[in-house]
Image (cartoon, grey):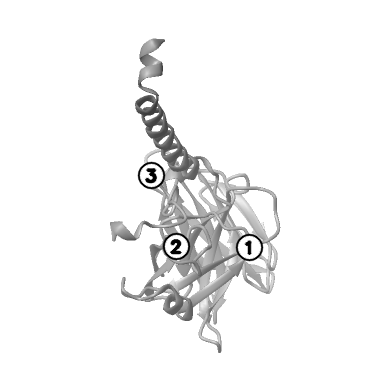
């Protein structure tokens, strides 16, 4: 007791240091425990395109020292999934040099997407980059990509056709009327590495074969098939992802601001 009274300043200093350390750890843990508002993957719809963009995981790109993360997007496959903690709108910017100021980055905005109103956290979307608008921004078509709708091991078939199309996915029979969609499980037949997809249409009362291809398959996959016509040819665009922990997403757990001293 006498010892404590003799060294009050020393004990106060130790307590303050421990408290500061606890608060610092608390801030770090908070970034990792807060659930993102949404997760995104992106892809160019047209062939032979690729570009690297940056975004602020917390949607605070107009603030000084806001954390910015890079995303590589191409037309062959979905980009790596990236997390977003903002509440209203996500913006992507053309990647610039590190020395470029935040104000200049805002001038190089490439895409913007307003999130639908929802109280549900952790929503998943695919952002389809279609083409550039007159204002220079990419026209985006957002596609909901929830695991509740498309479970792991399953695929969603989306018709962009004017007529009904008949599909045979392995042994699963699917009938899609114009503009409709259907989810089907992928069932790999014994001894095969992939699943065959056949597509047919009725013409003059007869079935006409439009497509017959084998697609690779894994029980860890899930994805979407978009079906559209180019003249008399059926175009099939498949977008898939492997089931991975969401904590591995770009931007996940990133703090809202960077420390200038770390640069």
Nearer the viewer's eye, disc 3 or disc 1? 1
Q: Quadrant of residue 219?
A: top left
Image label count: 3
Residue occupying the point 31% across, 74% down: 97
Which mark is in front, 2 or 1?
Answer: 2
Q: Position of residue 53 (x, y in %)?
A: 41, 70
User: For the residue carrying disc 1, how many other residues have a C-alpha within 10 Å: few (<14), some (14-19), or many (20+)?
Assistant: few
**Residue found at x 51% / y 70%:** 62
Q: What's the mark number on residue 192?
A: 3
Residue 88: numbered disc: 1
Q: Calculate the distance from the C-alpha at mark 3 to the C-alpha at mark 1.
A: 46 Å
For the point 29% across and 61% down, which residue is it? 263
Q: Earlier in the sequence, mark 3 or mark 1?
A: 1
Q: Secondary structure at mark 1?
A: loop
Query: Alpha carbon of mark 2 to alpha carbon of mark 3: how far?
Result: 49 Å
Q: Earlier in the sequence, mark 2 or mark 3?
A: 2
Label 3, residues with CA under 10 Å away: few <14, some 14-19, many ≥20: few
Q: Which residue is mark 2?
A: 66
Q: Please give left or right for residue 100 compared with residue 29 in the image.
A: left
């Amino acid at each position: 007791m006498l010892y404590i009274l003799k060294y009050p300043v020393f004990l106060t200093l130790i307590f303050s240091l421990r408290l500061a350390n606890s608060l610092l750890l608390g801030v770090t843990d908070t970034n990792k425990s807060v659930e993102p508002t949404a997760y995104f993957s992106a892809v160019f719809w047209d062939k032979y395109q690729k570009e690297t963009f940056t975004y602020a995981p917390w949607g605070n790109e107009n603030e000084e020292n806001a954390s910015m993360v890079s995303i590589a997007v191409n037309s062959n496959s979905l980009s790596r999934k990236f997390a977003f903690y903002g509440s209203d709108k996500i913006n992507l910017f053309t990647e610039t040099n590190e020395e470029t100021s935040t104000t200049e980055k805002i001038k190089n905005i490439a895409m913007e997407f307003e999130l639908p109103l929802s109280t549900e956290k952790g929503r998943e979307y695919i952002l389809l980059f279609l083409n550039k608008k007159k204002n220079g921004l990419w026209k985006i078509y957002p596609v909901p990509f929830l695991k509740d709708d498309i479970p792991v091991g399953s695929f969603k078939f989306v018709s962009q056709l004017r007529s009904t199309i008949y599909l045979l996915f392995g042994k699963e029979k699917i009938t899609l009327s114009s503009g409709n969609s259907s989810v089907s499980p992928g069932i790999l037949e014994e001894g095969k590495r992939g699943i065959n997809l056949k597509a047919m249409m009725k013409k003059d009362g007869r079935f006409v074969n439009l497509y017959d291809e084998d697609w690779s398959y894994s029980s860890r996959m899930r994805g979407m098939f978009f079906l559209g016509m180019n003249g008399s040819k059926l175009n099939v665009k498949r977008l898939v992802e492997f089931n991975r922990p969401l904590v591995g997403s770009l931007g996940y757990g990133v703090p809202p601001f960077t420390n200038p001293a770390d640069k």
